[in-house]
Amino acid sequence: MKKKLVNRIRRLRFENGEMTQGELARRVGCTRQTINAIEAAKYGPSLELAFKIADEFKVGIEVVFSYEVRDQR
């Protein structure tokens, strides 16, 4: 089985006033490209950035990020 880091950033952005990637990036101190890469699962954020993102949405880190287990059969 393979684990993949998944996130709910896109859904959370839209549930919070349709926040843009650029606005979220500005609020957490990174670039829009970084937010885009995290949303697309092309980049795993640092632990610090993951907590900043969760704090921005006022939710626990486990609400934003989780591991999805996939069977390799």
Image: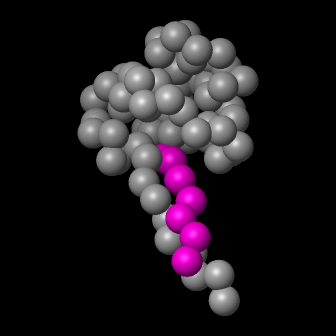
Residue visible at 54% across and 33% down in the picture: 45
- Kindly indicate the quadrant of the structure image that contains residue 40: top right
Which residue, as the protein is rendered here, is positioned at the far front? 1
Up-down relation of residue 61 to residue 16 (above or below): below
**What is the x, y in percent for residue 11?**
50, 44
- Kindly indicate the quadrant of the structure image that contains residue 71: bottom right
Residue visible at 50% across and 71% down in the picture: 69
Residue 17 in view (yes/no): no
Decide whether the magenta segment is chiefly helix, strand or loop: strand
Residue 40 belongs to the span the image colors magenta:
no
Up-down relation of residue 73 to residue 23 (above or below): below
11 left or right, relative to 64: right
Q: Which quadrant does the C terminus fall into?
A: bottom right
**What is the x, y in percent for residue 22?**
63, 17
Q: Report the front residue among 57 and 72.
A: 72
**What is the x, y in percent for residue 36?**
68, 32
Q: Which residues are magenta?
A: 1-8
- Kindly indicate the quadrant of the structure image that contains residue 58: top left
Residue 4 belongs to the span the image colors magenta:
yes
Residue visible at 60% across and 24% down in the picture: 20
